[in-house]
Amino acid sequence: MFAFGSAAMVDANAEGMETEATVLFVGDKSVVKDGVAALTRLKNGLSMRFDTASLEPGDAVTVWWVIFDDPAKCSDGACGSDDERSMIRADGHVVDSTGSALFKASLPVGLMER
């Protein structure tokens, strides 16, 4: 339903760097009003914040980490759904009556190696 406004490639050495992006509807790529997503590289992993609106009240919504461990192997010079990736659930809950939701999560270094 929603996607970050840009793919965030995070440099493993860019500690403390936050990348913020507009939130878009996946289907028509229109901007979600009051939607913002942020990804922060920390010394021991990643942190994310995804604040959005326009959700259906009462729906259960999940947010997932999608990790391309070797971007050099991605086709067409960009990583996408046809490339090898790992996925792990980041956060999720039932949307409140306003249709707005705030998701937060962290991903420690090494978690995907288990």
Image: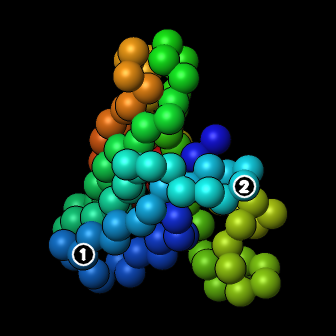
Q: Which amino acid does label 2 sit on?
A: Asp
Q: Quadrant of residue 101?
A: top left
Determine whether 23 is above or below 43 in the image: above
Q: How far apart are marks 2 and 1 (CA)?
A: 30 Å
Which disc is residue 28 wearing? 2
Q: Is residue 33 left or right of residue 2?
A: left
Q: Nearer the viewer, residue 109 or 25?
A: 25
Q: Which residue lies furthest to the front in this view?
A: 33
Give percent across and percent down for residue 57. Answer: 48, 17
Q: Quadrant of the N terminus?
A: top right
Q: What residue type is labelled 1?
A: Met
Q: Earlier in the sequence, mark 2 or mark 1?
A: 1
Determine whether 31 is above or below 92 in the image: below
**Residue depth check, mark 2 versus mark 1: number of the one nearer the observer:** 2
Q: Is residue 79 left or right of residue 94?
A: right
Residue 102 at least partly seen: yes
Determine whether 74 is above or below 61 in the image: below
Does dot 1 land on a helix, a strand or a loop? loop
Does dot 2 land on a helix, a strand or a loop? loop
For the point 20% across and 68% down, the residue is 43
Q: Label 1, on which residue?
A: 17
Q: Is residue 70 left or right of residue 35?
A: right
Give percent across and percent down for residue 110. Answer: 38, 57
For the point 59% across and 66% down, the residue is 68
Q: Which of 54 and 48 is in front in this view?
A: 54
Residue 111 at least partly seen: no
For the point 27% across and 81% down, the residue is 14
